[in-house]
Amino acid sequence: MINFTDRVYLRLNNSAPDIPKLDIVKKIWWFQDGKWAPQGFSAHGDSYLTLTEQSDNPPTEPNIDLFEITVQEGAEPHEPLLVVDRGFVAQKDISAGGFIASNQGELYLGSGRNDQVDVPKIILTHSDVSRLQGGGSLEVPAIPSGSQFPAGEKGQLFIYTPTSSLYKHNGSTWVYQGPTSNYAGYFDTLYLRKANAQDPAHLDVGDINIHGHLSIGNTVTSDLNPDPNHILGNDNNRWLSMVAENVKVNSLNPIPAGVGGNGTWIDVNTKLRINGDLQLNNGHVVSSLNPSGSIALGSPSEPWTGVVAITGYFNNLRSPDGNIHIDDTMVYIYGSWHFQTGYVKTDNIAPAWQSSMTIWSHMNPISAGQYGLGSGSQYWAGVVADTFYAHWYGWFDALDDLELLKGTKSKTITQEGMEVDVIDPNSLPFLLRPKREGETEDFWDVGKSMGFMVGVAKQHLARTEKLEQRVAALEKALSLD
């Protein structure tokens, strides 16, 4: 045994194996037929240090060899690595300037460092350092910036301020990396990446407690099912918004007023389409309910039972059976009332001739002398009025009214099951209302009839006066005075 306690360093001069990068991985991590079978370092050169408990020369197993290898990777300088062909234990800390890789096995974390109750954790030690501006407790320098590119060397970063863009030197020129906004923030986020160091890796965990925001950047490929006693957010710590294709809930409740909500309503800031039923239990609609012009409220097969409103505005009033029914109330019309091939019908009053419609104001046509009340095919059964006014009466001075009256004939008709004698309209044709298209019955023109009766009375009066004159002359001749 050689005692090295009087030396300040140990130097072993010899060649070190030069091994490709992927082959190094195979030597420490490999499987054969599904069984753990790393290739190992069968050749470690002539410069190595063996730690063993055996005094044999060469030492027998088990022992530990420490030796040097170099990494063979393209035209890059061959980086030396210190290899231990067995495991090792560190009682305290391990710090690395590069990456730490475990090709086989797991990451075991026992507890925290402070005391027995401290929990295991992953700590981002440079979380106070800006990715672009550096700083932090280590006072990391900022990435150089300016309006002119420097000469640069491979791997150097530079911020081109005129366009706020980040560039990286590839050894010959500056290569655009993207806007600086893509690199904002600090080293305060932990990323899980796949082997290409770019694509996000998967994480399979049990319970997860999130004290900040949960951001899902791509797709959730399975259900996110909570314990039925848990809620997503609460009144004091609520989500800003939720975007989903389909949401199923048992109830929607407003946020209480005491924690920033209104406590009364839920806002829907766009159109709301309900493909099922809409039910309001003791609720109110507090603003206009405006549909698209092509949307109806109800349908002929599913009509509303009733609509109660202070005011209703309509272009058309229609009902599934073609009739509008107004029951047990009055209708007030303050504007025009226009019937186009329609009618007013009052029901539910017996006997039928007592059915009536009460009008509290004048009912005037839109144009004088243009419209009639009823028609030759649909006429009123009767008109009862205190006073009847006609615009004009007929006058027949050219006719012998008394002779025409003498020529009046009668005919017998059946009315309400009884035979009744009436004036034959054909005996006084000049007093008839001219028939219109589609009409089969005759109607007397009241204006002409009144004029005719005045003519008859006038002619009768003239004859009476003439007769009185003759009687007076006769009395005088006979000295009857």
Image (tube, rainbow, N blue to C red):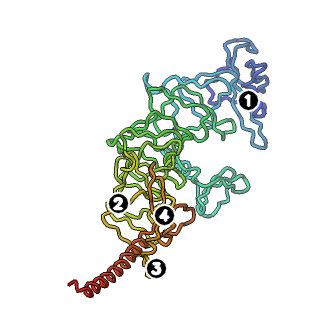
Classify residue 101 by image quadrant: top right
| Sequence-wise first label, 3 or 2 | 2
Amino acid type, label 3: Leu
- Residue 38 drawn at (x, y percent): 75, 22
Q: CA distance from mark 1 to mark 4?
A: 126 Å
Residue at left offset 44%, top offset 71%: 406
- 10 Å crowding of disc 4: few (<14), some (14-19), many (20+): some
For marks 1 and 3 on the same chain, the one whose residue lies earlier in the sequence: 1
For label 2, the residue is 384
Q: Return the disc, 1 or 2, that comes first in the chain's sequence.
A: 1
- Amino acid found under the numbered disc labelled 2: Val
Residue at x 72%, y 53% (from the top left corner): 171
The mark that comes first in sequence, 1 or 4, is 1
From the image, which quarter does the N terminus lie in?
Answer: top right
Taking 286 as reference, is 426 left or right? right
Query: Closer to the observer: label 3 or label 2?
Result: 3
Disc 3 designates what residue?
399
Residue at image mark 1 = 25
Report the side of 464 relative to 23 (left or right).
left
Q: Nearer the viewer, mark 2 or mark 4?
A: 4
Position above or below: 248 against 158: above
Q: Secondary structure at mark 4?
A: loop
Q: Is residue 362 visible?
A: yes
Depth order, front residue of 370/216: 370
The Cα atoms of the two marked residues, 3 and 4, are separated by 19 Å
Report, in whole angstroms, how far the alpha carbon at label 1 lies from the one at label 2.
115 Å
Front-lying residue, 352 or 223: 352
Give the Cα distance between marks 1 and 3: 134 Å
